[in-house]
Image (cartoon, rainbow, N blue to C red):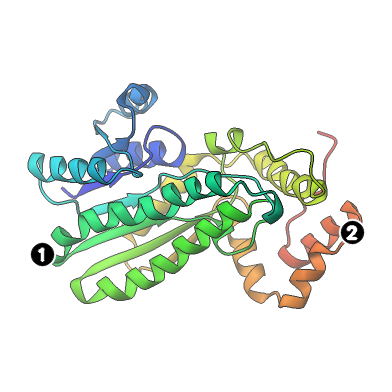
Amino acid sequence: MKRVLVTGSNSGIGRSTAILLAAQGYEVFAGMRNLDKATKLLQGAEAANTELKPIVLDVNDDASVQEAVASIEAQSGPVDILINNAGIALNAAVEDVDIEVGKGVFETNFWGLIRCTQAVLPAMRKQGSGHVVNISSVAGRIAAIGQMVYSASKWAVESMSENLAQEVAPFGIRVSIIEPGVTRTAILAKNMGHPEPTVYETPYRRMLQFYARGVMANTPAAEVATVIHGALEDPSPKLRYPCAWGGEELCTGRAKLDDAAWVALGACESDEEYYAAFEDCFGLDIRPTSE
């Protein structure tokens, strides 16, 4: 039975992934900062007729990460699979960024991921196998307007993952990048605000409209969990797995889009012009609806 550590397991993609993998026969350690928030996780596991093990893990704290991994190794053995899921979002144009708040996003989304990876790699190298799964975002492949810090943190995850994949390949360790589009998770509700007043009302409005259309698609976190499970079991493993609403379209579309077209998209004067250009670029209709 493979041992899995999932960070940020108290909600969203992390919770769905922990429950699904436990149901599929993995030994799951569900990391979270506060075990008092494990209620829904445990209820979900019970409903799925499976068991998992909540464990205290704060990805922003060196000692917490080391203690969690040491506890797993003492209880059961080395972590075979690390799923770096814990993350936070932030809405801000460049001029609006509160730098200290922005540092906090990178602390969790980037340095937290590195802390956890560093903690499990020695044992993985020793056993000659392992799998690190990093939950990125389509915002790691496309500069999400109005979300500069969040997007930059996910671009950093993409770069780190590419580096890591080459570094650990000689040791028999795999790396997978999961790139969800819009998914129905708690991170959306926590990410509706932005600095006001601001001269950047237009990009914020267009960004929020993009998410509004994505929310309408009602993609559950369980769908991303299924992709993660598929990546673990993939007989022809890939580095990247785009998924959820807009995932494939945004990643593929941005790769085909030249820089001039990207800049021109931001220069659209009216929202209707922007929505039409966005659809031309990515094949996604994000116009407001009457529903």
Residue hosting label 2: 273
Chain-order first, disc 1 or disc 2: 1
The circle drawn on residue 54 is none
Residue drawn at (36%, 28%) of the image: 41
Q: Position of residue 108 (x, y in %)?
A: 42, 47
- Which is more toward the observer, 99 or 282? 99
218 over 180 or under it: above or below: above
Q: CA distance from mark 1 to mark 2?
A: 56 Å
Residue hosting label 1: 126
Residue drawn at (58%, 53%) of the image: 149
Residue drawn at (75%, 67%) of the image: 281
Q: Position of residue 228 (x, y in %)?
A: 39, 52
Q: Position of residue 164 (x, y in %)?
A: 33, 69
- Which is more toward the observer, 99 or 241? 99
The answer to whether the residues at label 1 and label 2 have Cβ atoms under 8 Å apart is no
Label 2 Cα neighbours within 10 Å, binned few <14 / some 14-19 / many ≥20: few
153 over 258 or under it: above or below: above
Say which element carries label 2: helix
Residue 108 located left or right of residue 171 = right
Residue 39 located left or right of residue 283 = left
233 over 68 or under it: above or below: below
* Type of amino acid at the residue the image marks with label 1: Lys
Quadrant of the snapshot with the C terminus: top right
